[in-house]
Image (spheres, grey):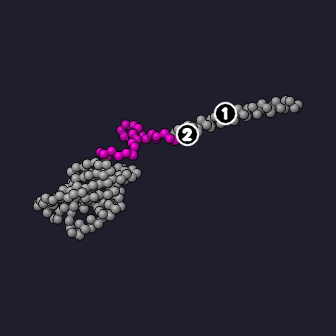
Amino acid sequence: MRYPLAWAETAQQNSVLKYSLLFSSILSLVLILTTSYLVFKNPLVIERGCYSSPASLGDNKRTNDEIESFLRFALPIRFSTDSMTSAYIWLSPEEDLAKISEFKELVAKKVRQSILINEIKFNDQNVSVEIDRVLSVDKLKSVFPTTIQVRVATVSRSDSNPYGLIIERIELKKEGTNVTENK
């Protein structure tokens, strides 16, 4: 074999290897860009029901209706002596301790407490809630109209807390005179 033929064959192999390297580099770059595009794209979530449809993905911003619904659910858990369910999902640790101490005090006095929510008003970060506290001893019931300030905090949504909200702090704003009812 002559040297010029060997050099020509080596040059041809180098040319083929250069083009295959260029082609694999371009292909790798395209795959990297496609993968990164798919990684940052919102996932497609299918809501199952009678008719399957893509579920709308919401942001973490809570609407006033959602906060109001949460408060109508969580405040009776906080103040009612009838429901001693685990409230740590809905309340901050400080409010949970306040609920437990208040519960022990009311049980020691044989007083039952429940609340009725009248109106919810939204301020900047706090929510003003007008409630009626109903305290009862046997058949004697007293109603105390009260306004409380509630600070709601955001947590991650879960199956046990679908609202993704907890009651961080409750402050008594004003308490009215009682209305006693004997049944």
| Tag 1 residue | 23
Amino acid identity at mark 2: Thr
Residue 94 badge? none
Residue drawn at x 29%, y 66% as measured from the top left:
101
The quadrant of the image that shows the C terminus is bottom left
Percent position of residue 89, x then y: 35, 57
The quadrant of the image that shows the N terminus is top right
Helix, strand or loop at mark 2: helix
| Tag 2 residue | 35
Helix, strand or loop at mark 1: helix
Magenta span dominant secondary structure: loop
Local crowd at mark 2 within 10 Å, few (<14), some, or many (≥20)?
few
Q: Which residues are magenta?
A: 39-66
Considering only vertical position in the picture, is 4 above or below 149?
above
- Identify the mark nearer the N-term, 2 or 1: 1
Residue 159 at least partly seen? no
Residue 135 placement, left or right of 93: left
